[in-house]
Amino acid sequence: MSELAAAVERWLDEVVIGLELCPFAAAPRRRGRVRIALVLPADEDALTAALEAELERLAATAAEELETTLLAIDGLLGDFDDYLRYLDFAELLLRQYGWQGTFQIASFHPHYVFAGSDEDDPANLTNRSPCPLLHLIREDSLSRVLARHPDPDAIPATNIQRMHDLSPAQRARLFPYLLG
């Protein structure tokens, strides 16, 4: 396993699941239904081919086998503005292929900054990952787990508070890729 793939796994297990940022991630992870697909694309065309392949894999595989995919991008889209531009393109791709309403894409990036927030706002940590990521999510699965959650609207505010409550030492341990 590459160093980056290991970092993504640690982030998933310690940050996303460990801090319960996504209260729905633990069960599919435990059952082996989360795919981490590391790609090293030469350019955006190669990334698009990898994205299409992962969406096709999800479409062709039952959720009981493969629930979700984290497409981890190595060596491309390191600039957050470039990433956001590509994310817009990826959303268009979902519509173009008729996958809107079937899949959605959640976004994570090492330099993630929510619109209107300061770069150093701890709230941004909720979407900061070791590398640019496109999280490919099944809409049906998301709808089912949200319907069972007692207060899905509170999840973002709860996550932001968790990030604010972390000590500097905890942040350094959980987000080592942000240091330096």
Image (cartoon, rainbow, N blue to C red):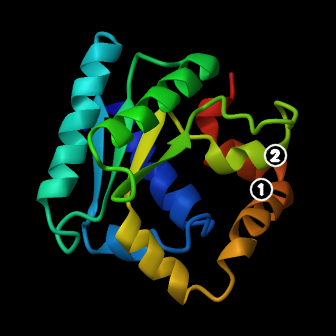
**Residue position for label 1:** 163
* Placement of 21 over or under 144, stated as above or below: above
The residue tagged 2 is 122
Q: Residue at x 38, y 36 (%)?
A: 72
Comparing 72 with 90, the one in front is 90
Q: Is residue 91 left or right of residue 114?
A: left
| Residue 109 image-quadrant placement | top right
- Please report the residue visible at 62 percent of the width from the left and 64 percent of the height from the top: 21
Mark yes or no: residue 5 visible: no
Q: Are marks 2 and 1 in contact (CB under 8 Å)?
A: yes
Farthest left residue in view: 60
Camera sees residue 123: yes
Is residue 46 placed above or below 71 in the rendered structure? above
Q: Residue furthest top?
A: 42
- Rendered-image quadrant of the C terminus: top right
Secondary element type, mark 2? helix
Horizontal side, residue 170 vs residue 35: left or right: right
Name which residue type carries label 2: Pro
Q: Position of residue 27 (x, y in %)?
A: 38, 77
> Which of 83/109 is in front?
83
Q: Nearer the viewer, residue 88 or 173?
A: 88
